[in-house]
Image: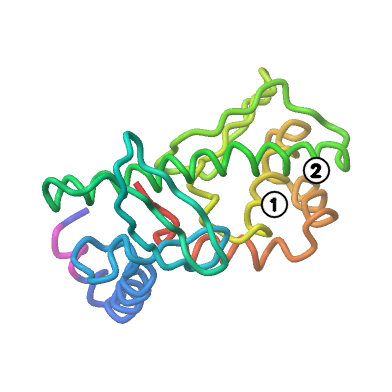
Amino acid sequence: MREEDIYRFLRVKINWINRKIAQIKSQISFKDKDSENYLKEVLFLGKKYEVKINHDKLKRCKVLLSDDKINVTVPPPEQEITQENNIKSAIEKWYKFQAKEIIPARIFHFSRIIGVVPKEIAIKTQKRLWGNCNYRTKKININWQIILAPIDVIDYVVVHELYHLLLPNHSLRFWQNVQKIIPGYKNTKKWLRDNQSALSFV
């Protein structure tokens, strides 16, 4: 495109762009490194938890979930930046553990309802996708960071990928099948789109 056409487009869309920027800033404030709340408040299953830091003579960091807090026990800090990295690493490791416990259980639950079973499940980091399915190998990949979202959002992603084992497309029939299991999938899909930035921990 010509540069003048790009600027014309930006001028037309400026209000929408500003609204989206404000929305994203409000979503990521809890994990923004420039925010006072960085690593003081994190999401898990759609709920915000205060991060409480404890120090003890441990070889490894320990993370425990209570009613309204995520308690992180770390060795005494040598440097502030080292402690910050240790805390972030410990929470990320805990997230991945929770994802590997919760997501396969949801896949198994909906597999029985739908009547299709993946041959392989992988819980891994995916920068641009919440999930994807290889129709030929019957393998499902799920982004572990979806564990930050509410359980109904996780269920939508799981059901979406399970149905791709049967239909490798986004046809009307595909969405009709998804709707049978997740009647409010359109709202869930919109929530996921609107809150995508807030669900990225790495």
Quarter of the figure with residue 183:
bottom right
6 in magenta: yes
Tell me what residue is drawn at x 67 percent, y 39 percent: 161
Q: Which residues are magenta?
A: 3-7
Residue nearest the viewer, comparing 36 with 133: 36
Horizontal arrangement in the rendering, residue 159 relative to residue 5 (left or right): right
Q: Main secondary structure of the magenta part?
A: helix
Q: Residue 129: x percent and y percent?
A: 49, 43
Compared with residue 99, is residue 198 higher up or lower down, i.e. above or below? below
Horizontal arrangement in the rendering, residue 28 relative to residue 43 (left or right): left
Q: Residue 38: x percent and y percent?
A: 28, 63
Q: Residue 87: x percent and y percent?
A: 31, 49
Residue 173 circle label = none
Task: Provide the residue designation for mark 1.
Answer: 155
Q: Residues within 10 Å of mark 2 (few under 14, many from 20)?
A: some
User: Label 1 amino acid?
Assistant: Asp
Which residue ends up furthest to the left in the rendered image?
79
Q: Residues within 10 Å of mark 1 (few under 14, many from 20)?
A: many
Secondary structure category for the residue under label 1: helix
Residue 110 circle label = 2
Secondary structure category for the residue under label 2: helix
Compared with residue 10, is residue 64 higher up or lower down, i.e. above or below? above
